[in-house]
Image (cartoon, grey):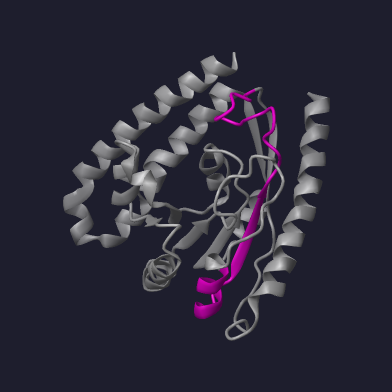
């Protein structure tokens, strides 16, 4: 059953990728007139694919609307990375108008990778640290001008163990340099429920929690290591809480 669900997800991924790319190409002339529309293109792919993938896998997403409404603009949103399906889950915590940071290799994926670039998202080379930081720094004006949020997985790669990996500094440096608040987003464990890569697609409740924004106006010039460690610890603690909540919801259903 897990293999069949994974196959359906792949078919849906390709199908929605084709539709999104076609929509993006058709919208190109309008993007020159209204550039801010480019940064709404993510919604064309992510939201429909999120609904489709949750229906296929049997995931029941739980998000507090009040938490979502409290997200400031612009801000740097950070989340834990467990699987390729993360963007279809954690993205539902993001308000409309978000740029996603991903590895450069994504553009090699036909259709989706091209659309991902067309939508103005950031593709960075994880091996080129200075170049990656420069690209992140250059996006600040876009965030402010178009009231966008920047979404990034600070672990840098998905955690195969299910536990949190150490955070890389990039997201925190761009927030500190520009005084942007950091919004931690925590998704409960997808082990056995929604790990696409290993066919662990049993479904169940998934709880996504949006923690209060962390202000960074006084971070510039400070040692970021203890500040990053504090946010990491808070997210790990919240991860345990949402795991318990998701387990209780599963037990009732």
- Residue at 65% across, 31% down: 60
Snapshot quadrant of residue 112: top left
Residue 173 percent coordinates (x, y): 54, 73
Looking at the picture, does residue 17 appear above or below residue 3?
below
The answer to if 174 sits in the magenta stretch is yes
Dividing the image into 4 quarters, which one contains the C terminus?
A: top right
Looking at the picture, does residue 133 appear above or below residue 156?
below
Position of 10 with respect to 26 (left or right) is right
Position of 249 with respect to 47 (left or right) is right
Q: Which residues are magenta?
A: 172-201
Residue 72 percent coordinates (x, y): 56, 66
State the residue in front, 153 or 252.
153
- Residue at 28% across, 50% down: 118
- Residue at 33% across, 45% down: 107
Residue 108 percent coordinates (x, y): 32, 41
- Residue ranking furthest to the left: 29
Looking at the picture, does residue 94 appear above or below residue 84?
below
Residue 183 percent coordinates (x, y): 61, 62
The answer to if 91 sits in the magenta stretch is no
């Amino acid at each position: 059953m897990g293999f069949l669900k994974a196959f359906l997800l792949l078919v849906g991924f390709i199908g929605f990728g084709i539709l999104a790319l076609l929509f993006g190409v058709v919208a190109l002339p309008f993007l020159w007139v209204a550039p801010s529309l480019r940064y709404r293109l993510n919604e064309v792919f992510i939201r429909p694919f999120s609904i489709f993938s949750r229906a296929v896998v049997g995931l029941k997403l739980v998000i507090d609307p009040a938490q979502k409404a409290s997200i400031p603009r612009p801000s740097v949103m950070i989340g834990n990375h467990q699987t390729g399906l993360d963007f279809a889950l954690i993205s539902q915590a993001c308000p409309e108008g978000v740029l996603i940071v991903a590895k450069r290799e994504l553009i090699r994926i036909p259709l989706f990778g091209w659309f991902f670039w067309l939508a103005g998202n950031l593709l960075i080379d994880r091996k080129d640290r200075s170049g990656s930081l420069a690209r992140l720094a250059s996006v600040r004006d876009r965030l402010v001008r178009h009231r966008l949020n920047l979404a990034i997985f600070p672990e840098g790669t998905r955690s195969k163990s299910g536990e949190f990996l150490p955070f890389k500094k990039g997201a925190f440096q761009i927030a500190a340099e520009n005084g942007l608040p950091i919004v931690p987003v925590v998704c409960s464990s997808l082990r056995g429920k929604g790990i696409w890569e290993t066919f662990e697609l049993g479904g169940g409740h998934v709880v996504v929690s949006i923690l209060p924004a962390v202000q960074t106006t006084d971070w510039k010039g400070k040692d970021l290591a203890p500040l990053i460690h504090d946010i990491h610890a808070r997210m790990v603690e919240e991860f345990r809480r949402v795991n318990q909540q998701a387990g209780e919801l599963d037990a009732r259903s």
